[in-house]
């Protein structure tokens, strides 16, 4: 059942990246380019009294200082709801709001210009807690919003949870909180823009969605989206934080005012903390009821997300969190409420996991409480309730599985059979001096794609080059997750050619074809499917054209072999370079597209959610974490981690493991380290010396950082795969918490801050004191 | 059963042609273009002693006089076998052979230059009769050919004909001869060529095979076929006579010597008679045996074709004639021999019917003789022996029929039920004074495509224009048969758009994609199938892209409606112009290809014929001709003609009728009028005042020139159609002969020349004298 034989070829971008030859957008600095930078509000909520740019304009080297009055178009950014100003004119609603844009001949002049802008703000009362934001007396972030600070709310309901609780033999409840999180990608938001003499706006941006960016920029600045060319080279990380406008509109605005010249913008780490999107802080109230035998019966859940001042993707993230709130478990009655509240905190946005991280932490912690209540092994309780194919998930959608029937139970079985779990008591007993050890195990699920009502689409272009090689026109940016390399592998296998025969162009709206964003665990699945369809057209074309050369009237009998098309009957071949020399360019192109299939006859459980609900395809996983607690310092160390996943066919075992390792590290960071130290809308830890993320030293070494990918095959997936960039992030948070309970021998809920991430050494010390006292 | 309800829209090229706006290649005369012309041998067989070009070079306006020494490359033209010189150097083998090429600034200078070339020939004994050519003492056309004057021979054999004749109750035999025929297209061979500074050779030619022409020119002149661009506008007729090099290599040669300048060449009518390809004169010896009840049992047939001096397509034409030699009849034992002999007559080549005309005349005449012998009605005898689906044809291939089972029997039934046939005796009795009337009825079949072993392929390109219309990149020239209009109809129906939304670009090797020639009744079938596949891709693309605009996650539910993509659920539409504005050029193209399926497990009946044998798909027909014979002049008038055909689904009834009328006229011309008056290799009637073809006055008026297209549907065809440009030419020859017998009351074989086409007034008069004496 456990797959160990998958391929592990070197991915095509590995060498260029290792050698430093890969060019990211941040590496592009055309000679003579201008530099742009935004002046940020620095105050969480205020009326703008004055923005005096005169002194800044006089700084030598400063070529433009732009304010709201210089913005054509609507001045409104936003993927779904367009409410975020490009430049603020009357009011600022969080510290990162931009009030002016300076363009200068040098970075030094830019810094000097930014320093000479004189702003005068009239402070307004702020709101920094989403629950407080919903109270009647709360200051309004948008005074004209009908709903006050309530950005969105919704209900997903299956069965009759209220009534079902009455029949439950055991009921647990609790409140679980997860914090804001910064993506901390290596490459900060950056890009370049130039208005060409032809009127075409040309951009190179570190973005997850170049095709959609055009429309967002066009809306904000009143431009023609078809007169833009956006290129998206490899990203030095994205994780959702580049799914939406960062530098785009500001750069475009600068370019419009300085036609013909390249303008470059790079956010510093501090500016990224200040102005970038964040994982939503969330508060989840949960009530979970079960029969005496442990069978889950009812769930009531209420999720509250801190949206910050602008809509961005908050409603969508809330919806996905709600859809996952019941976990990968069989619960007949569920009632899941969600709300997003506006605050004057940083803007909430997409982040690997997209609401599911918050939901998973809550349901898994509730299951731990239930296991205690029922005196059950937490893993056995999960295994008992694990959803099987054909059963209805928490929002009433039948669980699908691939052709092999692999499900979350299989992930749990694999985890529970692993020595990290089977030998946990021995491992605990072998704890070094002044150390306590514990092990936790949880299950996870993560939907793939945009969900019903939103076409999850990609168009792929594949070229037979004039020299007989192949060029893939990738439409979905590679943030580092390896989709570009996966596309090479898929196409190489489909066309029976060596991977070295392929070049993979990175997204360029002028050369590649439209596709959705690089996000939602849909990147490889959706574009991969489109690409495979283009490969099938290409193979058919090559066979048909080779048949002409071979005077073969049955092209279907021909076979692609490396570098040629071969006729097994005559044992003759046509080399691809020769074939390519016969074909004009148009005829060397194959284009096809794919739209992810959606749930047919969706259940009536989420009536209000017409776009993006429900989802049909899920990856499943289980996670085992072993922690070591330093009894003197309270520090918690992730000593062991196992991720088991069912994510369709594994195309590259190395690629899957890299994603799981990265996701687990990011999940562990959320659970143990990362702390924005927000205080009245101001980030206390807006530097990497204050905002700690796990380093290699904080993570288990490889033998203790294990991955098991189960035999799985998704019939609708490209060569059977599913997206799996997100599934690995969900487990470490709740598994670490459970492990900590195991180590401490007490429920975390019993200790201050124990229901809240990150788990702090201080809370551990307090708990240990309580134990010893 | 008889279709009367098919569409009859105005074809898209009708108005431009009627208004004289359509531009044929002959209409293109770029300012300052040069004129090229060839000096023809004028002697049928000779050694070239001297070609003195000095005087010609001195003619003012003459810019080049080229001879064999100026030809780079192989100097050999030919579609299959390359043996025809571009310019003859040592020897001429027929009167039309070119010995020099003059290029001049004007047509007048060209004529003067051609007149100043002094040639000296040393005459060689010629051979002008194919049977004589095969005698041991015959002069050799090619002294180095291993087979002497035998260009090709072959045998198709099914069962044991020799033995079967012994069991026959009735055996007839005869020799039937058909003459050489000129295509007499309105637009003579012509074209233009220019060597561009880039080295690309650009041509505009009246040709049936622009894509293949590149390779023929390249071979003859040592060029790169991929560095040529050939455009083929509408042809003013082709009929096979432009399937192969006419002006191509001479023009290219001229252009190579005069880089940068356009060179134009137009053959006069006389030059076309002299140098153009001709339908092969053929002599067919046939022996046909039947049971007493009329069931055909055995056929022995020997066909001899006059190839002229070069191979061209003679062997292929012979093979197709042999494959059709048994007619559309059930004959268990056949033995069909074929031979082509070299002579010093004009070069035999493709002509509508491609060997089948000759074969059909012989088998149908033999059936008439058999009917007389058995005292059977000639139609009933044919009906009795008509092949049914599933039965084996004359070379052992099972007869296929479309989904409706329509076969040649149905064609015969329709003809035999028509008043032209049922009321023939009354019509005969109503003959005007000094006139005799008679009616004949025959059955026909004609294969479609290149046959097994030669990929019958086309690649189609379809563009959504930037304005939301559609552009078809037609790859197969339209000689007038209407395939371009058919493609518009096919695509319009497939995409549910009005025909006015389509533009059809005529073949251009730089813009359109490769396809086989416009010939072999395969043009509309093969390219049409490729185009429909491209249309399916286009429809899928349009639905998928419109779905993005409509936020519809189920593109398959969208429908194309005129000018838009429509969502029946939301009742919203996306206009095609808007959709087009979103797509870059590459994404507005759909390309696909098609290869005609071939006979699987071919019978062992034609072992020697590995390329182009056997064929799988046939059109079927029957033809009724009513003649009026002037007893004073002997003149034969085609007074009535009915063609019934089963040719798949009828897309345009008008288009089918135009093809049937044209083909019947051309068949009637061969039977009654056309006479090359060859004498020792010299054409006696090389002008349209001597070589008579039927005019409208020689053909029945429309009510008497009837067509019936049967309900038929070919499942592999584009929207069910089959090719039908050739089927109509076969019937009139034998049907006229039978009708003449009916009119005269005597077998034609009994009168001098009665077994030979054309049927002459002199022979009729002789017969009438015989009757009256």
Image (cartoon, coloured by chain):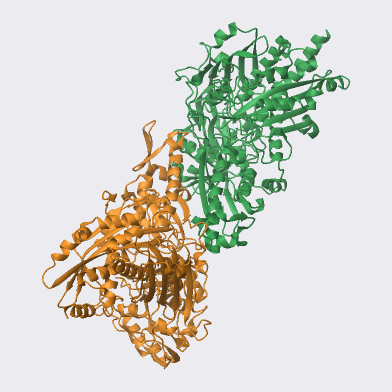
Chain colours: A orange, B green
A76 lies left or right of B706? left
- Residue A771 is situated, as x and y percent measured from the top left of the image, at 19, 77
Closer to the camera, A168 or A537? A168
Q: Residue at x 26, y 57 (%)?
A: A416
Instruction: Tell me where residue A718 appears, x and y as whole percent.
Output: 40, 52
Foreground residue, B398 or A298?
Answer: A298
Residue A201 visible somewhere in the drawing: no
Corner quadrant of residue A203: bottom left
- Looking at the image, the residue that sits furthest to the right is B433
Front-most of residues A293 and B588: A293
Q: Is residue A2 above or below residue B649?
A: below
Whether residue A750 can be seen here: yes
Q: Is A494 on the left or on the right of A72, as rendered?
A: left
- Residue B461 on image: x %, y %: 53, 48
- Above or below, A745 relative to A146: above
Residue B610 pos. (x, y %): 47, 25
């Amino acid at each position: 059942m456990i797959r160990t034989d998958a391929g592990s070829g070197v991915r095509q971008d590995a060498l260029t990246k290792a050698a430093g030859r890969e060019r990211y957008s941040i590496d592009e600095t055309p000679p003579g380019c201008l530099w742009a930078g935004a002046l940020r509000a620095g105050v969480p909520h205020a009326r703008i009294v004055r923005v005096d740019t005169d002194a800044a304009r006089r700084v030598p080297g400063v070529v433009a200082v732009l304010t709201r009055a210089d913005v054509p178009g609507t001045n409104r950014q936003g993927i779904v709801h367009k409410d975020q100003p490009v430049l603020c004119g009357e009011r600022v609603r969080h510290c990162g709001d931009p009030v002016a844009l300076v363009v200068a001949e040098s970075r030094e002049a830019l810094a000097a210009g930014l320093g000479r802008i004189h702003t005068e703000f009239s402070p307004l009362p702020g709101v920094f807690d989403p629950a407080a934001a919903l109270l009647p007396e709360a200051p309004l972030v948008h005074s004209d919003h009908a709903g006050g600070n309530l950005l969105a709310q919704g209900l997903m309901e299956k069965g009759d949870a209220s009534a079902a609780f009455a029949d439950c033999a055991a009921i647990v409840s609790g409140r679980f909180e997860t914090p804001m999180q910064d993506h901390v990608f290596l490459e900060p938001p950056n890009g370049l823009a130039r208005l060409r003499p032809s009127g075409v706006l040309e951009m190179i941006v570190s973005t997850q969605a170049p095709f959609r960016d055009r429309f967002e920029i066009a809306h904000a600045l009143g431009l023609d989206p078809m007169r833009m060319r956006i290129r998206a080279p490899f990203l030095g990380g994205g994780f959702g934080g580049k799914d939406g406008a960062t530098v785009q509109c500001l750069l475009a605005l600068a370019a419009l005012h300085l036609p013909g010249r390249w303008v470059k913008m790079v956010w510093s780490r501090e500016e990224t903390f200040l102005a970038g999107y964040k994982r939503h802080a969330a508060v989840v109230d949960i009530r979970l009821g079960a029969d005496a035998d442990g069978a889950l019966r009812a769930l009531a859940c209420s999720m509250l997300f801190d949206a910050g001042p602008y809509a961005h993707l908050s409603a969508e993230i809330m919806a996905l969190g709600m859809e996952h709130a019941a976990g990968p478990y069989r619960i007949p009655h569920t009632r899941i409420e969600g709300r997003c509240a506006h605050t004057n905190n940083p803007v909430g946005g997409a982040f690997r996991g997209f609401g599911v991280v918050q939901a998973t932490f809550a349901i898994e912690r509730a299951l731990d409480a239930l296991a205690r209540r029922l005196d059950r092994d937490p893993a056995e309780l999960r295994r008992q309730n694990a959803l099987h194919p054909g059963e209805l998930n928490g929002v009433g959608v039948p669980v699908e599985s691939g052709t092999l029937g692999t499900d979350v139970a299989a992930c749990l079985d694999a985890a529970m059979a692993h020595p990290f779990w089977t030998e946990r008591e021995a491992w605990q007993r072998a704890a070094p001096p002044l150390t306590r050890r514990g092990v936790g195990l949880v299950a996870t699920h993560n939907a793939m794609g945009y969900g019903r009502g939103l076409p999850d689409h990609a168009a792929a272009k594949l070229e037979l080059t004039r020299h007989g090689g192949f060029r893939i026109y990738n439409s979905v940016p590679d943030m580092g997750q390896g989709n570009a390399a996966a596309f090479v592998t898929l196409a190489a296998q489909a066309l029976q050619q060596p991977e070295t025969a392929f070049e993979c162009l990175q997204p360029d709206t002028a050369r590649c074809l439209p596709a959705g964003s690089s996000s939602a665990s849909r990147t490889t699945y959706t574009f991969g499917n489109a690409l495979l369809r283009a490969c099938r057209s290409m193979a058919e074309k090559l066979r048909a054209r080779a048949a002409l050369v071979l005077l073969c009237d049955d092209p279907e009998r021909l076979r692609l072999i490396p570098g040629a098309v071969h006729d097994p009957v005559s044992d003759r071949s046509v080399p691809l370079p020769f074939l390519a020399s016969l074909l004009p360019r148009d005829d060397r192109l194959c284009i096809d597209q794919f739209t992810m299939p959606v749930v047919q006859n969706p259940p009536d459980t989420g009536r209000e959610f017409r776009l993006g609900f429900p989802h049909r395809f899920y990856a499943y996983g289980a996670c085992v974490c072993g922690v070591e607690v330093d009894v003197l310092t309270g520090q918690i160390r992730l000593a062991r981690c196992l991720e088991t996943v069912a994510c369709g066919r594994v195309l590259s075992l190395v690629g899957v493991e890299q994603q799981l390792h990265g996701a687990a590290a990011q999940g562990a960071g959320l659970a143990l380290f990362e702390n924005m130290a927000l205080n009245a809308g101001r980030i206390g830890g807006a530097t990497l010396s204050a905002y700690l993320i796990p380093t290699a030293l904080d993570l288990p070494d490889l033998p203790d950082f294990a991955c098991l990918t189960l035999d799985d095959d998704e019939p609708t997936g490209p060569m059977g795969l599913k997206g799996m960039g997100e599934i690995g992030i969900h487990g470490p948070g709740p598994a670490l918490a459970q492990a900590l309970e195991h180590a401490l021998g007490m429920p975390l809920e019993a200790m201050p801050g124990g229901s809240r991430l990150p788990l702090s050494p201080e809370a551990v010390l307090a708990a240990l004191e309580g134990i010893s006292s």
